[in-house]
Image (spheres, rainbow, N blue to C red):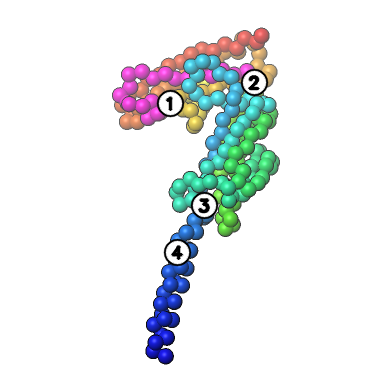
Amino acid sequence: MRAIKPLLIIVAVLASAFALNARAQTAPTSLSGVVISWATDTYVPTGFQGKRLPTSGSDIAAWVIIFVAGKPVSAANYTVQWYANEELLQSGRGLAAISFKAPWTADQIVRLQARVQSPDGDLSVARIQVPVVTGPSANVAALPYFFNVSDASSLTFQWSANGVTAQNSESPDSAVITLGDNAPSGTSIRVQVTATNSGGSTAATAYVNLTYQKI
């Protein structure tokens, strides 16, 4: 009996080692977050540095980035449900990207949502608002000079149109001025932007007057 006991101990240790190795090779799938990005292919003039915006009927491409333990992973093992304005667009395993037509919306916003479920049943939801141009519009951009910064992205931009403040969170140095579908010809808009550095010690303001002429 004493000769058999060491053999049993060795087998138990080996079995335990193989079990630990198997667990170590299993990749984690628990979600730590998801992020949505989007793009459109509408026309903009040469030199425009802002983000292109969709118009009603134009194509919007959207994709989701899945994070596990703080690192991006492949969507192959995850089920993704895509919604626009609370309506299901598409759903499927590994559906990391979709393309759809921008709908007409009264408030000029598409509320895009991606619901991502892991193989373990974890659910994470990402939401983003996509502005949609539905009437006459103009793209304007701020070009800062001589600020004491190395990158314009460290500046804060504050936009207003006829005194009404606005903000473009994705491209802060640009703005899209949109009129209603029934805007009369000759409508005038004063667009103003103020750029400020992070410390608030330097600021500059510029403005432009735009007049809509219906063709």
Q: What residue do we see at 52% from left, 26% from top?
A: 51
Q: Tell me: 45 left or right of 21.
A: right
* Cα–Cα gap, marks 2 and 3: 40 Å
Of the 4 image quadrants, the one containing the C terminus is top right
- The residue furthest front is 3
Are there few (<14), some (14-19), or many (20+) residues within 10 Å of tag 2?
A: some
Give the mark nearer the N terminus: 4 vs 3: 4
Which residue does the numbered mark 2 point to in the structure image?
A: 135
Are there few (<14), some (14-19), or many (20+) residues within 10 Å of tag 4?
A: few
Labels 4 & 2 near each other (Cβ < 8 A): no
Figure quadrant of residue 24: bottom left
Camera-side residue of 156 and 120: 120
Which residue does the numbered mark 1 point to in the structure image?
A: 157
Type of amino acid under label 1 = Phe
Q: Can you give x and y, in whole percent of width and height, for residue 49 in the image?
A: 48, 21
Which residue does the numbered mark 4 point to in the structure image?
A: 21
Of the 4 image quadrants, the one containing the N terminus is bottom left
Q: Can you give x and y, in whole percent of width and height, for residue 114 in the image?
A: 60, 43
Q: Which residues are magenta?
A: 135-157
Q: Tell me: 166 left or right of 103.
A: left
